[in-house]
Image: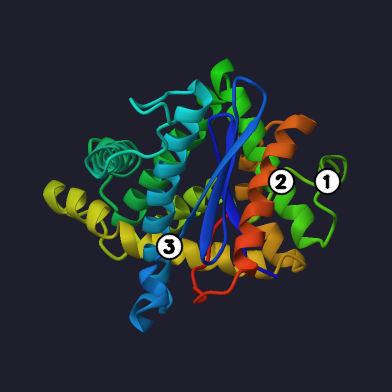
């Protein structure tokens, strides 16, 4: 069984397998458009990039790059943006992709990594241990409040429905069920490999990593919060990956429960039409994964 993950996009879903990814989008005319691409992963070519922790950093970077491309495709199809030759434009330019990537990552790092550190640094806390604990609490609180606020936006409701449609389709596939909307609808909208849970554990694990540094000077404070992010992301990736393979372990699932609960903020019950789109993307990936070609060892998050 192929290891499949995905992401909600505008009016659609992107699904990703070890060697390919596909995005399916419901167009304004009611049709489902789909685009698929191969994955040329560095992890498939170099042993070093498949080592624990390192593979998490690589997988995260590749997932973000694919996610931006999928979002661009979905935005163009959802609005039926056409080029001069009459074809629907489905790709961002490399420059636009890098710019969007940099802005998004910069925003997240400043708000959820550097911001809480500087806020805590302004508090009258002398103990290094209490400093990282308070910083962690502020970081998690800001993240949960951010998700709670955006979950109230009406424009994001359909994106959250497609997010749930992605989870339901993967849950049904991993259970060996037929990929039909009525069958898939019965499955949970929660998945242990969800990116929302991953982000929460990045913030929780950061407390333990930063504990080794106590309360440094403000410039080292900023530097450690930025430079240690790849290490923390790699650790979180290993945890989520392990959880995805041991979903029957009650103790583990209890420990990971906060990340699963948090998904309630970023998922909404999808319609059968939305499940149809998610299933289309999943079927396309599964069909392509069965085609002959060099296998990839990429692990993905749902």
Q: Secondary structure at mark 2?
A: helix
* Residue 32 sits in quarter: top right
First in sequence, mark 3 or 2: give its number. Answer: 3
Q: Secondary structure at mark 1?
A: loop
The answer to whether marks 3 and 2 mark residues whose Cβ atoms lie closer than 8 Å is no
Q: Where residue 15 sits: x, y (%)?
A: 58, 51
Can you tell which of label 3 and label 1 is closer to the viewer?
Answer: 1
Q: Where residue 300 sits: x, y (%)?
A: 53, 61
Q: Residue at x 28, y 60 (%)?
A: 228
Q: CA distance from mark 2 to mark 1?
A: 7 Å
Q: Mark 1 = which residue?
A: 180
Q: CA distance from mark 3 to mark 2?
A: 23 Å
Q: CA distance from mark 3 to mark 1?
A: 30 Å
Q: Residue at x 41, y 25 (%)?
A: 82
How many neighbours does mark 2 have within 10 angstroms: few (below 14), some (14-19), or many (20 or more)?
Answer: many
Q: Residue furthest top?
A: 154
* Residue 268 sits in quarter: top right
Can you tell which of label 3 and label 2 is closer to the viewer?
Answer: 2
**Quick one: 65 or 55, which is closer to the camera?**
65
Q: Mark 2 = which residue?
A: 279
How many neighbours does mark 3 have within 10 angstroms: few (below 14), some (14-19), or many (20 or more)?
Answer: many
Query: Where is 193 relative to 96, above or below?
Result: below
Q: Mark 3 = which residue?
A: 59
How many neighbours does mark 1 have within 10 angstroms: few (below 14), some (14-19), or many (20 or more)?
Answer: some
The answer to whether marks 2 and 1 mark residues whose Cβ atoms lie closer than 8 Å is yes
Q: Residue at x 68, y 38 (%)?
A: 277
Q: Where residue 234 sits: x, y (%)?
A: 41, 65
First in sequence, mark 2 or 1: give its number. Answer: 1
């Amino acid at each position: 069984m192929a290891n499949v993950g995905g992401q909600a996009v505008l009016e659609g879903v992107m699904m990703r397998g070890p060697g390919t990814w596909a995005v399916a989008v419901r167009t304004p005319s009611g049709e489902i458009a789909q685009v698929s691409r191969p994955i040329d992963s560095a992890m498939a070519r170099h042993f070093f990039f498949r080592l624990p922790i390192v593979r998490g950093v690589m997988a995260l970077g590749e997932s973000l790059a694919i996610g931006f491309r999928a979002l661009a495709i979905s935005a163009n199809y959802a609005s039926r943006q056409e080029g001069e030759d009459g074809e629907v434009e489905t790709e961002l330019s490399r420059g636009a992709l890098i710019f969007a990537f940099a802005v998004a990552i910069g925003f997240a790092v400043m708000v959820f990594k550097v911001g809480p550190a500087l806020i805590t640094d302004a508090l009258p806390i002398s103990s290094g241990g209490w400093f990282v604990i308070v910083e962690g609490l502020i970081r998690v609180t800001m993240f949960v409040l951010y998700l709670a606020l955006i979950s109230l936006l009406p424009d994001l409701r359909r994106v959250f429905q497609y997010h749930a449609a992605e989870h339901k389709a993967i849950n049904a596939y991993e259970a060996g069920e037929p990929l039909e909307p009525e069958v898939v609808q019965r499955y949970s909208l929660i998945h242990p490999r969800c990116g929302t849970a991953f982000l929460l554990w990045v913030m929780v694990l950061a407390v333990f990593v930063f504990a080794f540094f106590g309360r440094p000077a403000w410039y080292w404070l900023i530097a450690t919060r930025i430079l240690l992010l790849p290490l923390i992301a790699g650790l979180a990736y290993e945890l989520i990956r392990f959880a995805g393979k041991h979903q029957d372990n009650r103790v583990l699932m209890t420990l990971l429960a906060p990340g699963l609960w948090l998904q309630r903020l970023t998922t909404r019950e999808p319609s059968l039409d939305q499940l149809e789109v998610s299933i289309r993307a999943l079927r396309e990936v599964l069909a392509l994964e069965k085609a002959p070609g060099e296998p990839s060892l990429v692990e993905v998050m749902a």
